[in-house]
Image: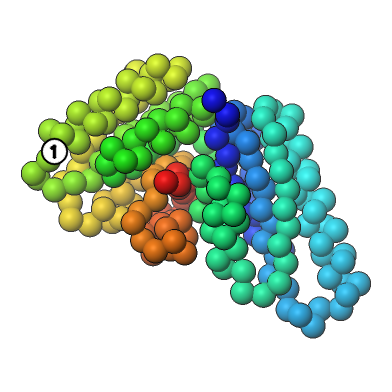
């Protein structure tokens, strides 16, 4: 089975750093570092070239960190105007397994995994199961649902926990929780306090909005945390 692919957008001209704990957590993933650099068309050609050289140097330096720690890393730089949808377009084109909705990353020790239904449980188990369990010290599996199917969701999370334990995680480092709410984004945001990263599956929104649409951007904006979205 091939390693899952994670697309990591790097926003220029002032990219947020990727701490060693984040890099170390994804050593079993194939990483694509996508530089996104918005520049007006009237930038002087020499200045444009200088910026692109500096951006590529940063991207290759980051790629070296991933390669040195484990799997492969690719680099791509996109420049131009109005690049908001670029990560989603590249994700579709490359058919990656997961995308990072970026926010400043300071540490990677506590992960909240929001599991909507069985559709993404297998994909989430496969992706999270490859993460470095020595870096991730605590994981919570969360489902937000209504009052009618709490028992069913608890069973789903228990099954997912077993799969992660089989992948090498300690059963004592994984909690499960089913929360009753009619506003999943708000509930996930509230539950994410004291966590370093949120992992969740795509929603049923239109293609353009699946990963960088209202649901994920709302959670990223409310929590100020990076969000890894597992693609369908």
Tell me the element at label 1. Answer: helix
Name the residue at the right extreme: 46
| Residue found at x 34% / y 35% | 121
Residue 57 as seen in the image, left or right of residue 139: right
Sort mark 1 into few (<14), some (14-19) or many (20+) by Cα contacts within 10 Å. Answer: some
Quadrant housing residue 209: bottom left
| Residue found at x 59% / y 33% | 29
Residue 106 as seen in the image, left or right of residue 187: right
Assign the N terminus to one quadrant of the image. top right
Which residue was labeled with disc 1?
Answer: 150
The total number of labels drawn is 1
Any part of residue 21 in sight: no
Q: Residue 101: x, y in percent?
A: 51, 53
Quadrant housing residue 65: top right
| Residue found at x 39% / y 50% | 202
Q: 148 above or below 78?
A: above
Q: Residue 24: x, y in percent?
A: 61, 30
Name the residue at the left extreme: 148
Name the residue at the bottom extreme: 42
Any part of residue 9 in sight: yes
Q: 37 above or below 102?
A: below
Q: Residue 37: x, y in percent?
A: 70, 65
Q: Residue 98: x, y in percent?
A: 51, 44
């Amino acid at each position: 089975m091939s390693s899952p692919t994670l697309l990591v957008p790097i926003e220029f001209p002032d990219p947020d750093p990727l701490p060693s704990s984040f890099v170390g957590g994804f050593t079993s993933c194939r990483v694509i570092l996508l530089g996104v650099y918005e520049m007006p068309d009237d930038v002087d050609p020499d200045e444009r070239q200088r910026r692109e050289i500096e951006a590529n140097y940063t991207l290759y330096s980051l790629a070296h960190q991933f390669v040195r720690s484990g799997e492969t890393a690719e680099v791509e730089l996109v420049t131009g105007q109005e690049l908001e949808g670029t990560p989603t377009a590249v994700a579709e084109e490359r058919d990656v397994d997961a995308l990072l909705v970026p926010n400043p990353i300071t540490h990677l020790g506590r992960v909240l995994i929001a599991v909507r239904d069985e559709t993404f449980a297998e994909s989430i188990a496969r992706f999270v199961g490859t993460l470095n369990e020595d870096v991730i010290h605590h994981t919570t599996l969360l489902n937000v649902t209504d009052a009618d199917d709490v028992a069913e969701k608890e069973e789903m999370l228990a099954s997912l926990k077993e799969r992660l334990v089989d992948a090498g995680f300690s059963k004592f480092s994984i909690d499960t929780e089913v929360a009753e709410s009619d506003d999943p984004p708000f509930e996930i945001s509230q539950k994410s306090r004291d966590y370093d990263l949120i992992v969740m599956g795509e929603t049923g929104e239109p293609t353009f909005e699946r990963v960088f649409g209202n649901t994920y951007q709302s959670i990223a904006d409310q929590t100020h945390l990076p969000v890894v979205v597992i693609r369908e």
